[in-house]
Amino acid sequence: PIFGRTVNPWDVTRTPGGSSGGAAAAVAAGLVPLEIGSDAGGSIRMPAHLCGVYGFKPTQATVPITGSYADPPDLPRSFRLLFDIGPLARDVDDLILAHRIIAGADGLDTEVPPVATGEAPEPPLGKLRVAFAPEFPGVPTALDIADAIAGFAGAIEVGGARVGQALPRHDFAAERALFSDLITWYSQVFRQPRETSPSLAAYLEALNQRDEFIAAWERFFDGWDVLVCPAMMCTAFRHREMGAPIPVDGIETPYWSGLSHACRFNLTGHPAAVIPIGVDREGLPIGAQLVGRRHSDMKLLAVAKALARLTDGFVRPPGL
């Protein structure tokens, strides 16, 4: 290979995740204070969770993708709807600083509106409405992760927030399947002959379904300021060939199921942050995914800062 295998600073026999695994590993190891990653299915948030650092995927089309990927029209629309650029760091303040620098129109990526990011004060816990979900229906989730999310929600409630276990009432399997369709169509259009691409009718129907899921999540956030949920189904697993099953509590689980907690917010374009909240029984990091209403990026980061005060923050990997 041109580049060697990237390892997790917590255990070099395990993955740092991907695709921004190198960014998360570098931040966790103290090589750099800040990194910029890309996220089309969890590629910022999963490495942040696996390496015990902070990560942020902004609202879709908030940060220009100029220079990070092919410019339109070479970048297929199905992929542009899923793809975002965001920071990884060792605390929320650095996420906020980085996001304010990179967000907003650059005059080249025409998808990004010329709207200022603004500021949001850190909210008192007593004014927050926090929904939590230890797992998503039909999605494998390690017990240690589900327990950590529930325990974190309990700490938030003790801190004064109104907390409830809640999710939108919709078909989560269909939501995950729609993401798979769009990412598959991207591969077909970008890498294979045009004859294999989907029909216009199928693509328009997919966009309609996407709008329905976006609307369902927006209605959900009418009643909640933030959702606290897993970022991934397991903690850092041992290196393996891409596509090989991943063990979740001893059960071999399809490789691509690992995206299921994160990818749905690429589909809907909602902002999502990951903050470290503890470790599993093997001492490997666990991150909580925090999700907010579309275009509430600065508010979500302010909420993340408030909730991060209830944790031990960034913990240096053993031996570093």
Image (tube, helix red, strand yellow):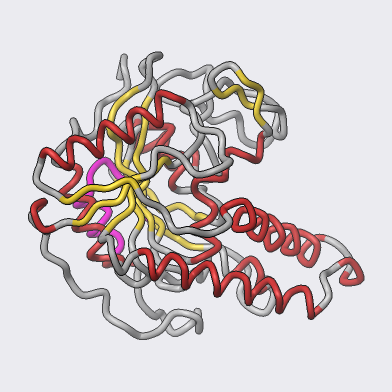
| Res 75 seen here | no
Between 143 and 320, the residue placed more toward the observer is 143
Q: Is residue 74 above or below residue 305?
A: below
Give the position of the C terminus as an image quadrant: top left
Residue at 71% from the left image edge and 28% from the top image edge? 244
Give the position of the N terminus as an image quadrant: top right
Residue at 36% from the left image edge and 55% from the top image edge? 291
Farthest residue to the right: give it. 195
Report which quarter residue 300 is drawn in: bottom left
Image position, residue 159 (x, y; %): 10, 41
**Magenta stretch in the rendered image:** 87-99
Q: Is residue 168 above or below residue 149?
A: below
Image position, residue 87 (x, y; %): 36, 53
Report which quarter residue 175 is drawn in: bottom right
Image position, residue 183 (x, y; %): 68, 59
Residue at 56% from the left image edge and 45% from the top image edge? 260
Is residue 182 shown left or right of residue 136? Answer: right
Query: Is 92 in the magenta?
Result: yes
Is residue 113 shown left or right of residue 199? Answer: left
| Res 191 seen here | yes
* Magenta stretch secondary structure, dominant: helix
